Image: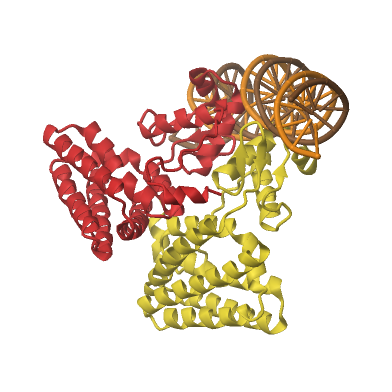
Chain colours: A red, B yellow, C orange, D brown
Amino acid sequence: MTSPMATHQIDLKPRLDLRISPKTVQQQAVEKLREAILAGLFKPGDRLVEGELCAMLGISRPSVREALRSLEAERLIAMAPNRGFFVPTMSWPEIEEIYKVRALLEGEAAALFTAQATRARLAAMRAALDDFKAAVAADDLIAQLASTGRFYEPVLSGCGNRIIQEILQGLMARITFLRSRSMSRKGRARLSLREMTKIFDAVRSGDAEAARGAAREHVEQACAAAKIVYDDAA
Amino acid sequence: MTSPMATHQIDLKPRLDLRISPKTVQQQAVEKLREAILAGLFKPGDRLVEGELCAMLGISRPSVREALRSLEAERLIAMAPNRGFFVPTMSWPEIEEIYKVRALLEGEAAALFTAQATRARLAAMRAALDDFKAAVAADDLIAQLASTGRFYEPVLSGCGNRIIQEILQGLMARITFLRSRSMSRKGRARLSLREMTKIFDAVRSGDAEAARGAAREHVEQACAAAKIVYDDAA
DNA sequence: GATGTCCATATTGTAAGACAATCTGTCAAG
DNA sequence: CTTGACAGATTGTCTTACAATATGGACATC
C-alpha cells in the first residue's frame, strides 16, 4: 500500500495522505453530537429528541437518525424502541470493567511502544508532560485534560497496533463524563503527574515491563479516583 | 436495580427478563445483513448498493441506510463518501493486530473465568469440547465452528467482564471470513482440539495463569494458521 | 496507441412530507 | 388511591424528489 521508498525517508511527514474527502452532513453531525456528549452538553439520562436535534444541527430527520445510529453502535448513546435515543447511565460495575480493560490495553500499548519509540514521539510525550505539570501548577483543569490527551497520543499511535488504539478511544469516550470530575478531585492531579512521569521514565529507559506496570497502575489509580467521585454523586 | 431477593435464590432461571421487545425493521435489517456478511454472502471488496439491499430486504432506503450506518460503526463495513458502502478488505498487519488483541483479551477472560467458574458453565464447556471432538472426527466443518463457539461462550459470559465480551465479539466478527478457511486446513482441527483441551484442563484445575497461557497460545496458533491461508489466497 | 475530454447513466446525499404505532401525562370515574 | 380513557408528543417507516458525485464509454487529440 505505502510506497516502499517511504521507509528510507526520515519520519518527517508520517503518512500524509493527499486524499481529499468531502465531509458529508452525516459525518459532521456525528462529530458534533459526539463532541456535545463528551463535553457534557448531554448528560447521562438525557433524552435525544430527533426533532430538537434537527433544529439544533439544521439538518433533516433521516440524517439525524443516521448519525444517532452511528453513535449507538459506538455505545455512546442507546436506544429503546418507540422511546428513542438517550445518553445511557452506567452502573459502577460497568465502569469498573471499562477501567479493567483500559488497564490491560494501555499497559500493552505502553509496553509495545517502549520497544519502538521514536525520538519524535518521546519528545512529544515530554512536551505534553511538561504542559501537564504547568497545568497542575496553574490548577487549570481544561489544560490538564488536553495535555493528558497529548501525552497518550504518541503511545497509542506509536504502539504499532491500531486495533488497541481504536478500542481505547472508544472506551475513553464512554467514561469521559467521569474524567473531568475525578481529575478535579483535590490532590488527584498531582498524583496523576507522578504516575505519568513514571510511565515516561520507564518508556525512555526502554524497560517495556516497567512501562506496562506504570501504565496499569495509572489506570488503576484513575479508577479508584473515579469510584470516589461516582459514589459521591450517588 | 435488580431485586435483592434474587441473590437468595438458586441460579435456576438466570435473569429471565419478561420484557417484550418489539423488533424494529432496522434491527432486523442489521441482523440480516450482519449474518449475510459473516456467512460470506458479501465478500471483502463487494459493494453494498442501497437499492439492491432495499429489494433484498423489502424495506425502504432510509431504513437500509440506518442499518448500514450501524454496521459501519461496528467496522463490519466501510463507506467512501459518494461511493457508498462496501465490505472492507483487510491487510495482513491489520488482521494480525486483531489476533494480538484477541490473545490478550481471551487470555484475560480465561484467567478471570477460572477464578469464578460455575459447575454449569464448566459442564457446558465440556459438552462443547466433546461436540468439537466428534466434529473433528467426522470432519464436519460447520459443526466444528458451532461447537467452538459454544466452547467459548461460557468463558466470555462467565468471566465477569461484559466489556471484554463485547470487544471480542466485535473482533471475531471482523475475521470470521478467515476462520472457516483456516479451520479447514489439514491438521489444524486436531491441533485446535488439543489446545482447547489444554484450556479446559487449566480452567477446571483452577490454575488461572495456566488458563491464560493456554488461551493465548490457542489464539496464536490460530493466527499462524490464518496467516498461511491469507498468504495462499494472495 | 496512449492520453485527455466530455457526456449519459447509476448511485449516493439529503430533504420534505406523510401517517400509523406507541408512549406520556392528565384527568375523570370508580 | 387505583383504573381507564383520551389528547398530545414522538418515534418508525415509507414515498417521493432532486441535486451532487462517480463510473464507464465515446470521441477527439497528440
Q: Quadrant of residue A67?
A: top right
In what quadrant of the picture does the C terminus of chain B appear? bottom right
Whether B225 is drawn above or below A227: the answer is: below
Q: Position of residue C10 (x, y in %)?
A: 80, 32
Q: Position of residue B186 (x, y in %)?
A: 66, 79
Label count reads 0
Is residue B1 or residue A61 the one in the foreground?
Answer: A61
Is residue A173 or residue B93 the one in the foreground?
Answer: B93
Q: Position of residue A109 (x, y in %)?
A: 35, 56
Viewed as shown, does residue D14 lie left or right of A167?
Answer: right
Q: Is residue A213 visible?
A: yes
The residue at 67%/63% (across/down) is: B233
Viewed as shown, does residue A42 lie left or right of B234?
Answer: left
The residue at 48%/65% (across/down) is: B156
The residue at 56%/37% (across/down) is: A69
Whether A84 is drawn above or below B192: the answer is: above
Q: Position of residue A91 (x, y in %)?
A: 37, 48
Q: Is residue A167 visible?
A: no
Is residue A197 or residue C4 the one in the foreground?
Answer: C4
Q: Quadrant of residue A62?
A: top right
The residue at 51%/61% (across/down) is: B96
